Amino acid sequence: MNSDFQWSVRPTPEPIVELERLGDEIAELSAHLDAASARLLDLIREFDARGGWGNGFSSCAAWLTWRIGLDRGAARERVRVARALGTLPLLAQALARGELSYSKVRALTRVATPETEERLLAVGRAGTAEHVERIVRGWRRVDRIAEAREGARRHRSRALHVYQDEDGMVVIRGRLAPEVGAVLVQALAAARETLYQRAQAKHGDDVRAETPRDDVPAETPTMAEQQADALALVAETALHHGIDPGTPGERYQVVVHVDAPVLADPDAPGQSVLQDGTYVPAETSRRLACDATRVVMQHDADGHITEVGARTRTIPPALRRALQHRDRGCRFPGCALPFGQGHHIRHWAHGGPTTLSNLALLCRRHHRAVHEEGYQV
């Protein structure tokens, strides 16, 4: 009898007991790693609070990058989590006991507060790291709705009061959105520098005592006096050149640090802050990125700068003139303001081109409404 059958013998599998032992050892070592991570975060929080990084480094994250070899993005995240756990003792204890992994704690600290910590701890214990990430994303979406309402309330609270004092001096008192305030601060800084340089050019650096001049100031103005003079120069310059944003200058810019995933998806975790660390909502960053009167620097997940908005995404002067000529003013229905900001209809973070067909002119108020209040054009 001729047979073509070939028989193969599978190797005997590892005994189930041995595999269970390996699994238990993996889980035990993982818990030890989480406990070590908790101790590391405690030390980072104390080191950061006491300014141990201040000798030659710009931040605790920069020091961690140098000392223990973390990339900048991971270092910033460690510092963020360490600071957050300082006010979240339940999560900190769960990490120290090895009950929660660092991945879960990192996600939960993005949304946890002392009031919600206990509920989120239960979520962390019950689900996988992926499940926790999903819950956190949903939680952040709810927070964004509340944040939008709070943003609308803050926006309604904007004000500028100008009145004349008893001695005839004009008094100005105001409340501005963070990004608007940053523009004002940069404009005043530019004007102060211009005034200082004019004084240097007029009088020179070597004014000699034996040849006094009546037009040389007797003393340097205080910062408050310089701010007042700078505001006057800003107003005079605006009236002289006309109230038109025109082509933005490149030296005095407002910089927004925003992680690339946040720019593409406002629900994604990551930073969205002004240069001085002031938080701005992700939709505000997307609005600022539409037009290069401000600069938005994109960072990847590792903290490296991947793109600088004003250098690569600015609306060229010729295209801006064409946009102004075509739209003649804000395109929002019922708005008659004759000037505005360039708005990318399809945001360039989603691949939208900087072309006339993908641009619309919107005044500041309606540009904000489109990005942060859900309106469309």
Image (spheres, rainbow, N blue to C red):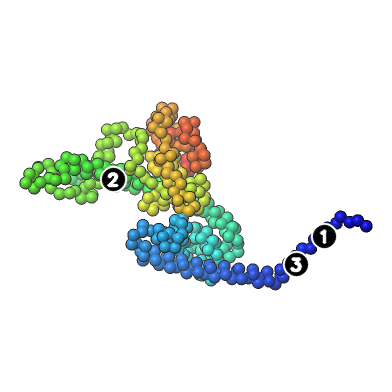
Residue plotted at (48% across, 50% down): 300
Q: Residue furthest front?
A: 2
Residue depth check, mark 1 versus mark 3: number of the one nearer the observer: 1
Q: Distance from label 2 to label 3 (Cα)? A: 77 Å
Q: Looking at the image, do the residues carrying marks 1 and 3 touch, with CB atoms under 8 Å apart?
A: no
What residue sits right under mark 3 in the picture? 12
Q: Which residue is labeled 1 in the image?
A: 7
Mark sitting earlier along the chain (2/3): 3
Asked if the residue under mark 3 is in contact with the one under mark 2, i.e. CB atoms within 8 Å, the reply is no
The residue at 36%/59% (across/down) is 57
Can residue 54 be seen here? The reply is: yes
The residue closer to the viewer here, 270 or 170, is: 270
Q: Name the amino acid, label 3.
A: Thr
Q: Secondary structure at mark 2?
A: helix
Question: Residue 42 lies in what quarter of the image?
Answer: bottom left
Q: Residues within 10 Å of mark 2 (few under 14, many from 20)?
A: some
Residue with the most extreme right position = 1
> Amino acid under label 2?
Ala
Location of the N terminus by quadrant is bottom right
Element type at mark 1:
loop
Determine whether the residue tagged by mark 3 lies in a helix, strand or loop: loop
How many C-alpha atoms fall within 10 Å of the one at disc 1: few (<14), some, or many (≥20)?
Answer: few
Q: Residue at x 21, y 47 (%)?
A: 225
- Relative to 53, 376 lies left or right: right
